Structure formats: C-alpha cells, structure tokens
Image (cartoon, rainbow, N blue to C red):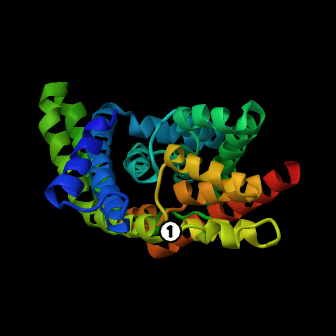
C-alpha cells in the first residue's frame, strides 16, 4: 500500500543526498521521511473521513443514549474490538480519538480504542500467527483487547474530561456549530465538503509540529541505538526486565507489523516471550511520537495518567506471558 512512499524515501536518502546505504544516518533519515509522509497521508485521510462521519453523526442522541443506558462495561469492550479492526499506528489513531470525542463518546471509551488500535490489527495478527503460532497469537489478541477495555474503564472513573486542552474544546465547539448548520440548512455532502476540508486543515496545522518532532525523535532512536543494547538489559535473569522493556520502548516508534520481526529476534536470542511482547506493546502503544501528538489534545497530566495506566497493564501482561510460557 505504501510502496510509493518507500520509493520517495529511497530517492531522497540514496539519490538526492547520496547517503551510504545501511549507515546509521541513512536508517534514521529513511525512517523519518517514510513515516512523516505516511502519517501525514493517513492523518489527512482519517481526519477527512471522520469529518464526513461527524457531519452526519447524531451527537446528542449518542450522548443521551450512553448517559441513560447502563452497558455494564460493554462500551469499552466494543471500542477495543473496533480498535482491532482499524489498522492504524498510534499517531494516526489520534484523529479517530478526536472524532470519537466530537461524537459525544465518553473519554474512557475513546481511550479503550486508542490503546487497542495500534496494538492489535489484522496485519499484526497474520504476522503473529506466522512467527509464533495460533495459541500465542490468540492470547496476545485477547490480552490486547483486555488491556484496552480495562484501561478505558479505569481512566473513565477518573473523570478526566477537564484535562482536554483548550484547542480540543475549541474544535468541539466549532464542530457542534457546524453540525447544527448542516442539520438546519439540510446541506448536501457536496456543500459540506469545503467546511470539512477547512476543519482538516485546522486540525492538521495544530498537530503537525508535534508529529514532526515525535517522528524525528523516533528516527534518531531507530538509527542510532547500538546493536545488542536490548539483549543486554532484557535477559531472563533480570527480574525487572518486563517493566524495563516497557520503559525502554517509549522512545522508539513503529507499528505492530514493523516491530514484530524485532520481537522474533529478541525471543530467538533468549529473551522471555512476555518481556519481548511488553517491549512490543510499549513501542506501539506508548511511543514518544504518540505522546507528542497527544500533548496537543491533552494536558501533560492527562498524558501522564494515560501512559501510566497503560504501562501498568502492559507490565502485568508481560509477567503473565512469562508465567504462561
């Protein structure tokens, strides 16, 4: 799907700048160019599609339904399951997160989606089966869904809506006014498109600096972390290897499909499966680029709480994997 981006990145790094292939600088620059183009492309598409959906979305009806009906936690499970079928990385999940909030979905439910979406998707599942077999894959998928469900439930109980940034609140107010206009004037999709495009540009301009900075940090780590660094600290004799794996993963950035081959190498070198999976979950669910992007929509306190709850769940999952396997 993204072969054209790979071609552009190859041309810029190896032809335009004439950088030696397989050098650390080449790996870092290639990563930066490829992921910047890919994420910006996904952001535009996702924000645009969510803009169309939200222009027709019955916000008040959904909000009233969720407030009046007890679903006994099923809403968190459904959000996690939706995360499984959306093949997005953590950064490109954020526009969907904004769309959920705009649609009147409770913050905890949106967090369930935000946690599960980068961790588990059909591509990652296919690779996981090929690398580790059906049994381990099934447990991994189940743990990802439970992780999202529990994290969303816990975060909802903390009543964190007040920690959304003023930028998001402005976007929400503007969206409500636009939807009222759409309904009152019975505008066609063609008439709504220019307004939706303006919204795409507004959101994109707001998050762009955070995306660039985050990917730049991830690219630097990707290109310059020494070989053997993780094997040295995550071996089976280290009782704190699981939490250390989750913490060491934060500066990294990749999607589940990209990091799975690394997980296979770590396991082949003797690192316990649970520790390797905790590292994978940390990379795709707690990445620094994601934190930079979330900083635009959440206060530092809320980002910290979100990362804290997810980290605890990842560590528990890692230890459970090590016990089972």
- Image coordinates of residue 324 in percent, x first then y, are 87, 48
Residue at the front extreme, as displayed: 20
Viewed as shown, does residue 253 lie left or right of 37?
Answer: right
x and y percentages locating residue 56 in the rendered image:
31, 31
For image coordinates 71% across by 57% down, the residue present is 269
Q: Is residue 25 above or below residue 71?
A: below
**Relative to 206, is 38 above or below?**
above
Residue 47, above or below 226 = above
Q: Classify mark 1: residues with Cα within 10 Å, few (<14), some (14-19) or many (20+).
A: many
Which quarter of the rendered picture does the N terminus lie within?
Answer: top left
User: Can residue 202 be seen at all in this image of the molecule?
Assistant: no
- Residue plotted at (67% across, 66% down): 231
Residue 74 in percent (x, y) is at: 67, 38
Left or right: residue 5 compared with residue 321? left
Report the residue at 55% width, 32% height from top: 122
| Residue 64 location (% of width, % of height) | 51, 40
Q: Residue furthest right?
A: 323
| Residue wearing tag 1 | 303
In front: 277, or 23?
Answer: 23
């Amino acid at each position: 799907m993204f072969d054209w981006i790979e071609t552009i990145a190859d041309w810029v790094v190896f032809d335009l700048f004439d950088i030696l292939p397989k050098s650390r600088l080449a790996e870092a620059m290639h990563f930066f160019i490829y992921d910047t183009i890919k994420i910006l492309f996904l952001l535009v598409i996702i924000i645009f599609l969510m803009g169309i959906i939200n222009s027709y979305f019955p916000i008040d009806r959904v909000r009233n339904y969720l407030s009046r009906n007890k679903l006994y936690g099923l809403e968190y499970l459904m959000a996690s399951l939706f995360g499984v079928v959306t093949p997005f990385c953590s950064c490109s999940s954020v526009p969907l997160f904004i769309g959920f909030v705009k649609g009147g979905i409770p913050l905890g439910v949106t967090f369930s989606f935000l946690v599960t979406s980068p961790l588990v998707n059909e591509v990652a599942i296919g690779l996981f089966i090929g690398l580790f077999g059906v049994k381990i894959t099934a447990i991994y998928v189940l743990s990802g869904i439970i992780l999202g469900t529990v994290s969303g439930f816990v975060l909802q109980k903390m009543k964190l809506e007040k920690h959304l940034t003023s930028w998001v609140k402005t976007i929400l107010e503007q969206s409500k006014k636009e939807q009222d206009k759409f309904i009152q004037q019975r505008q066609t999709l063609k008439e709504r498109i220019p307004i939706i495009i303006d919204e795409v540009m507004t959101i994109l301009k707001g998050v762009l600096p955070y995306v660039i900075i985050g990917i730049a940090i991830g690219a630097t780590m990707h290109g310059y972390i020494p070989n053997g660094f993780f094997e040295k600290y995550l071996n089976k004799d280290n009782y704190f290897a699981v939490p250390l794996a989750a913490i060491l993963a934060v500066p990294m950035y990749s999607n589940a499909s990209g990091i799975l081959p690394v997980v296979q190498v770590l396991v082949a070198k003797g690192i316990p499966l649970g520790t390797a999976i905790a590292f994978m979950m940390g990379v795709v669910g707690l990445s620094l680029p994601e934190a930079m992007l979330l900083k635009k929509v959440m206060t530092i306190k809320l980002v910290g709480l979100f990362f804290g709850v997810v980290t605890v769940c990842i560590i528990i999952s890692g230890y459970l994997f090590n016990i089972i396997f």
